[in-house]
Every structure is written in structure tokens, then in C-alpha cells.
Amino acid sequence: MFYSTESDLLARQPEISQFFAQQVNKALLTTTNGDLYYGYAIPEQPKAAIVISSGRIEGLDKYQELIWELFKNNYAVFIVDHQGQGRSYRALANPHKGFVNKFTDYADDLAQFDSQIVNTLYQGKKVMLGHSMGGAIAVDFLTRFKHNYSGVFLSAPMFDIYTKGTPKPLAKLAARTACLLGFNQCYALGQTDYLAYDFLNNDLTSSEVRYQLFRQTYQSDSILQLGGVTYGWLNAAFGFMSTLEQQQLTLPVFIASAENDTVVDNQAQIALVHRQNNAVLQTFAGAKHELLFEQDTIRQAVLSRFYQFCDSLN
């Protein structure tokens, strides 16, 4: 297997940029609410198709290194920017505000993308790769819609939010009350427009080169920038996550959990695995939230398990 490395990443940027420009097909998918931006790359004889459901503030542009790497390893790759993220439509006048009407809207969009784009262009083994919020969306899609996926690999999935110093019942009550009072489109307490935190203060990754590339990408094109969450998004997310206890996935599941995660609550991942018949969880030591953008030792361990998981599926 080929693994992209931090030491070569900057030197490889021209190659990755050329691949992204010339071999990743990009287009818009029209939905009832607005247009979703998506991309795909299909090698001549792919082993399988990887459909990426990315996390909050993420999208196609951020995943260039991984898409290039998967393609070099002979996987077809499909990815759609979720509504309110990346280059897809944003519902509010201030595009920085993280907002969704209903959390299930995300999976409704993913289902349309899967049926109209992925299944039209590719027939063969398909694996879902979901990160963070995208992991929650993947589970919602896989439990509510008829599909033909062989398995799902979840990187630090958002099955509950790490609320730091605020007791979780209080955070849920605040979000619910704010929405009842008509503040659903207002930023939640402490949330602001897009901020580029310096590397030393970031909660996402311990790979400085990958973190700086992510920030440079968003600095060079402000349309990608997304700020904090609104009370509406928070209330919708808490509401959806409370339903996960009733969900049963009928396909193989692998959960990669980040030991030092301060974005999502790892206890909810452990609880979900205990309720499933065919789920495996592995905790990656020393890892921050973004396992797919971590330093090489962690990232390669995660991707090695991912490739093993893909090979194990029919």
C-alpha cells in the first residue's frame, strides 16, 4: 500500500493539485433545497468504491491528500460537500453560521447523491468512510435507506458532543430553550465566524504540516470557510444523537476512536459498539480528533486498519 507522508507532502503538492484539477471530476447535484458540490475519481480497475461522508467544516477541497492516496491505491472515490459545508449551498444569510433545519436532512441528501451519482457511475463493492459529523450522517443514511454498501468505517464519529466544562444536560437545555424562543439561527454561546486557530491551540491534529495545509486551503478561498454552530444546529444534532440508541446497523462497522478527542464524546462510540452485533472499535493512542489528518504514525495505523477492513468485506 502507498501511504502519503508528512516529509513528502509539501514536495508532492504540485502532483496532488494536478491530480485534483485533472482527474477529480466535479459537479453540482441539485436538491430541493439547493445545490450540493461533489467530486469523484475512478481508476481503470478499482478494487472498490470509497464514499466519503466528511465532518463539519470539511469538504472535497480539504480531502485532496486522502482522495489522491486512495486513488493511487486503486480505489474509486466519491465525496459530496454536505449542505452548509464547503462549496455546497448555505441556508442562512451569514454563510459562516453552522445551521441545519433537521439533522436528517444531511442523510436525505446523501441518499440522493448515492442513488443519482454513485450508483450511476459505479457498480461494485462500496464502502462508506465517515468522519465525525459525517459518521453520524452515515449511520443515519445506512439505517434509514435501502443501500448496497458492504461496510462502514467511522473515524471519530460524532455520536455525542464533548461539551468540555458545560454539563451535557445544561447544554441540551440551553439549545432547546434558545430554539423555542426563536434564536435557532443565532450562534450558540461562544461561537463566532470562521477563526483560524494557530497550530499550538488546535484540537484537531498533531500534524503541523497537514494542519497548515488545511488552513492555507481555507485562507486561499474564503467560500470554504465556516464558523461555529447555531442553536438550531446544536439542537438538531442533540435531538438526532438521542435516537442513536434505537439504531441497529445490519452491515460490518469499524470505529476508529481518537484517544485524546476533545470534539466528540468517545463514550457514545463505546456504547454504540456494545449495542451492535457486527461492530469493532479500536482506540488510537495519542490521537486527536482528525485521525485522517494526523501525524504519520497514527494516520498510517488508521489507514492500515481501513484497508484491512475493506479487504475483509464481500
Image (cartoon, rainbow, N blue to C red):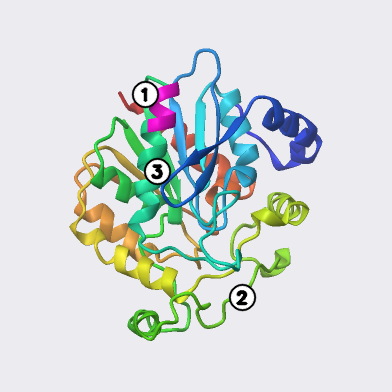
Is the residue marked by circle 2 packed among few (<14), some (14-19), or many (20+) residues within 10 Å?
Answer: some
Based on the displayed image, in which of its 4 quarters is residue 201 positioned?
bottom right
Query: Which one is earlier in the sequence, the residue at label 3 or at label 1?
Result: 3
Q: For the C terminus, give its image quadrant.
A: top left
Q: Which mark is residue 125?
A: 1
Q: Is residue 119 magenta?
A: yes
The residue located at (41%, 55%) in the rendering is: 157
In whole angstroms, how far apart are the C-alphas of marks 3 and 2? 28 Å
Asked if residue 156 can be seen in this view, the reply is no
Which residue type carries mark 2? Thr
Packing grade of label 3 (10 A; few <14, some 14-19, many >=20) is many
Give yes or no for contact between labels 3 and 2 (Cβ–Cβ under 8 Å).
no
Answer few, some or many: residues within 10 Å of disc 1's Cα (few below 14, many 20 plus, some between 14 and 19): some
Does residue 89 sit above or below 179 in this rendering? above
Q: Residue at x 43, y 68 (%)?
A: 233
Predominant SS along the magenta part: helix
x and y percentages locating residue 142 in the rendered image: 29, 43
Q: Which residues are magenta?
A: 116-121
Q: Secondary structure at mark 2?
A: loop
Task: Estimate the spatial distance between the alpha carbons at disc 3 and disc 1, rounded to whole Å.
Answer: 18 Å
Q: Nearer the viewer, residue 240 or 262?
A: 240
Mark 1 lies on a secondary structure that is: loop
Q: Position of residue 5 (x, y in %)?
A: 68, 38
- Counting labels gives 3
For image coordinates 48% across by 66% down, the residue present is: 99
Q: Which residue is mark 3?
A: 110
Quarter of the figure that contains the N terminus: top right
Q: Is residue 75 left or right of residue 114?
A: right
The numbered disc on residue 69 is none
Q: Is residue 25 above or below residue 263?
A: above
Q: Where does label 2 land, which residue?
A: 192
Chain-order first, disc 3 or disc 2: 3
